[in-house]
Amino acid sequence: MSKEASTMGSCSAHREFRRELFPVPSSVPLGRDLAEVHLNKWGLATFADDVTLIVSELLTNALAAGQGMITLTIALRPGVLTIEVADVGSGRPRRRKARKGDVNGRGLQIVEHLAESWGHRSTVDGGKVVWARCLLS
C-alpha cells in the first residue's frame, strides 16, 4: 500500500510518500529505490545518494530490531526532508562505536554524519519511529 500527498507550489511544496514494507531483507533495496524515485520526481535528485543511504541504514536497523510490518515515510517540507522508519519492535536505537573488525554497528553513525539530526519516538502501540532530518540547501 502506498500513499502520496502533495500540495503543489514553488518553494513551499509539501509532499509525503508512505509505504508499508514486509519485514524481509528485500525491503531494504525496495525502500532505497522508492526513495530515489520520489526524490527524482520532486526535483531532488542531487540528494539521492545521501537519502538512499539513510533509508537503507534505518530500514536495516528496523529489520534487525523490530518485528512485523515496517513503514517508510519520506516527507518534504520547505527546505527540509524527513525520513521516518516505523516498526513495532520495542528495542530503542542506540549509536554504537564499531571496532575495526566489526561488520555491523556503523549504521547510526552514518545516519548522524549524513543528516542534520536524527532521533526516535515511541508509538502508542509500543513500537517506535526512527527519523532523520536533512536540510535541502
Image: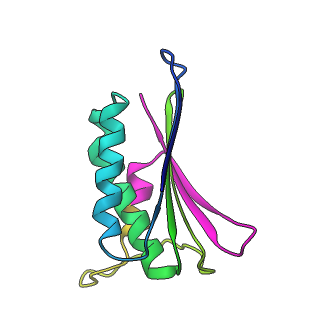
Residue 70: x, y in percent? 50, 68
Look at the image and say whether residue 46 sits in the magenta stretch. Answer: no
- Display colour scheme: rainbow
Stretch of the chain drawn in magenta: 111-137
Q: Residue 23, located in which quarter of the rendered image?
A: bottom left
Residue 27: x, y in percent? 35, 67
Task: From this view, report whether residue 54 is shown above or below residue 43.
Answer: below
**Residue at screen point 37% across, 77% down:** 24
Residue 57: x, y in percent? 37, 65
Outermost residue to the right: 124
**Residue at screen point 53% across, 49% down:** 117
The one of 57 and 9 positioned closer to us in this rendering? 9
Outermost residue to the bottom: 101
Left or right of 127, for residue 19: left
Residue 21: x, y in percent? 44, 66
Task: From this view, report whether residue 27 is shown above or below residue 81.
Answer: below
Task: From this view, report whether residue 117 is shown above or below residue 125.
Answer: above
Left or right of 31, for residue 8: right
Outermost residue to the left: 101
Quarter in which the C terminus is drawn: top left
Outermost residue to the front: 1
**Residue at screen point 58% across, 59% down:** 119
The one of 103 and 98 positioned closer to us in this rendering? 103
Left or right of 118, for residue 64: left
Task: From this view, report whether residue 134 is shown above or below residue 84.
Answer: above
Any part of residue 75 in sight: no
The one of 40 and 102 positioned closer to us in this rendering? 40
Look at the image and say whether residue 118 sits in the magenta stretch. Answer: yes
Any part of residue 57 in sight: yes
